[in-house]
Amino acid sequence: MRRLRIDFVQPPLWRLPVAGRDRRLLLAFSALAALAGVALAWHWLETAREIDEAKQAIAVARQELVQRTPPPAPPLLLSELQARATNSAIAQLNTPWPAVLDGFERVATGEVALLQIEPDHRRGLVKGVAEAKNHQQMLLYLAVLGAVDPFAGAMVRKQEINEKDVNRPLRFMFEALLDEPAIPDAAVRGPAGDDG
């Protein structure tokens, strides 16, 4: 019979039989793997929580940004009357005053007195009032005025003799057509084509 050695003192790991040693090493590695798994799961949950917090912070920041950003201004819509007034003001500002005044200065004579001029941008002309000593001088003045740049023609609209003046001059209203109007007629009148 074989002798059996019973020892109640646990021997160190390196002195254990091979099967027992492998079993304990396997348990140790399993415990380490379980701890590593728990640590990875905790790290993953922590990362997921941080991502959720970041998403919530971004959502709050976007909401604050939307609240702080003023709403876009509504598009400016002009009524027809406002559009006409704007076009009229632009046409008056675009009247070629230096060229118009130069044209009147080139035809100035001692026989005709220019009393008033006024642009009519809707019709692309300049209205005026002048006085001449007789019809011949009036017609000569208008013929020369109509041939001078920036005018494309001139005509009498109304004439009368000034009875209050002792010299009885001929007062006449005229229109001198501009070569290029400040604003085309259709743009001032609008799509309907009416003068208002």
Image: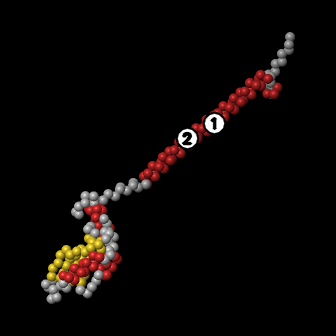
Q: Is residue 57 above or below residue 185?
A: above
State the residue lying farthest toward the top.
Answer: 1
In the image, residue 189 lies at what x, y percent? Answer: 26, 62
Query: Disc 1 on helix, strand or loop?
Result: helix
Q: Is residue 117 left or right of residue 30?
A: left
Q: Is residue 3 left or right of residue 183?
A: right
For disc 1, the neighbor class at 10 Å (few under 14, some 14 to 19, many from 20) is few
- In percent of the image, x 25 and y 78: which residue is there? 143
- In percent of the image, x 33 and y 79: which residue is there? 102
Q: Is residue 104 above or below residue 123?
A: below
In the image, residue 57 lies at what x, y percent? Answer: 51, 47
- List the residue tagged with mark 2: 49
In the image, residue 131 lies at what x, y percent? Answer: 21, 82
Q: Is residue 123 visible?
A: yes
User: Toward the viewer: 117 or 62?
Assistant: 117
Amino acid type, mark 2: Arg
C-alpha span from label 2 to label 1? 14 Å
For disc 2, the neighbor class at 10 Å (few under 14, some 14 to 19, many from 20) is few
- Residue 170 location, quadrant: bottom left
